[in-house]
Image (tube, rainbow, N blue to C red):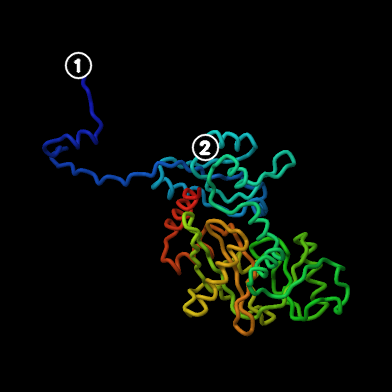
Amino acid sequence: MENIQTLPTADILQNAVTPIVLQGLPLETPTPLPKKINKSIEILMVPKPSVRAEHQKNVGIILDATIILKILSKHYKSVVITEIKALDDLERLVIRNPDLVFSGVKYFEFDGKTLWLNDFLDRFGIRSMASSKQALDREANKSRAKDIVQKAGIATAHYFTTCPGEHPTEASLPIDFPLFVKPVTGGDSRGVDANSVVNDFAGFVAKVAEIQNTQRSRCLVETYLSGREYSVGVFEDALTGALTAMPIEIIVTENRNGNRILDFDIKKNDSETVVAVTDSAVHQKLCDLAKVAFKALSGKSFGRIDVMMNGAQLPHFVEANLMPGLRKGYFYRACSFNLNMSYEQMILKIADNGLSYR
């Protein structure tokens, strides 16, 4: 048989003098695809919990891995999803030495020991996209975070921490009613409901006991702030350290007690309203507060700072989230309202930022 040498289609098109005709129709030269960036990214995941509703405390960001894979694969040369089940899986990742690990995992428990992902990757010079253990520890404990931002000159509601029996009488309470009671640790407004605003000692005792029983947590007790509620997304530029702040306002309807509380059920059901902050003076105050808080807590790359106004419309730091959700929640809406950024652009900015850290 005659040996016929063939060329790839692209070479045929490039070398053809006249248009190639297939079944009488000229074949148009295809539009070249954009050249992919020569970087390798691993989207790191952990096995899903056996009980669907179970909360994974070691996961800070729940990722839509297949969607993120599709987005990143359009722009980067090598993108894969990696599931980590054991320490061996992490060790093999180190050997592969990807340019970036894109993950919402905070830490692993292997053989009774806690291994914090981003600090582990730093040891091997592998870039990650979120904050260090030190920063995550600071924001996870809400009372510690308030201490830190207060020292940086940021206003925050007066507060104390407690557990059942620790403040046995109304006279032992260091601040006056009305109070707001929530767990010291935990996200997504877990433990927050209509009873979180307490106006008397009986309500205080009941709410503290409930949080201990259901959340297994000490309580953070604050002076109740009755003003508007905001969340401010923050991007850090990896090369310059410059911060971009992106405020949004969160509006909820009054509950049975006449208070506007962003509680667990409202977040779960996505029944709040999110709007742009159009008042330029308020916008600037929120941006200034969020940038100082992000720096004080040693945030990296991106995060979210929650803010409440008091009765005099002065902004007060509430809490921080240095691993905010990357679905279409508050952080995405902050990017969209303030920067007119699409979901794909947000994911690409986070990836590009992670790759740019030295």
What residue type is disc 1 on?
Answer: Glu
Name the residue: 18% across, 41% down. 27
Residue 54 placement (x, y as % from top left): 67, 53
Residue 227 placement (x, y as % from top left): 62, 80
- Check disc 2 and report the residue beneath it: 97
- Check disc 1 and report the residue beneath it: 2
Considering only vertical position in the picture, is 47 above or below 139?
Answer: above
Name the residue: 39% across, 44% down. 37
Confirm whether residue 78 shows in the render: yes
Q: Is residue 5 left or right of residue 72?
A: left
Name the residue: 43% across, 50% down. 71
Structural distance between the alpha carbons of marks 1 and 2: 47 Å
Q: Residues within 10 Å of mark 2 (few under 14, many from 20)?
A: some
Name the residue: 50% across, 40% down. 98
Q: Is residue 40 left or right of residue 28?
A: right
Q: Dots 1 and 2: beta carbons under 8 Å? A: no
What residue type is disc 2 on?
Answer: Asn
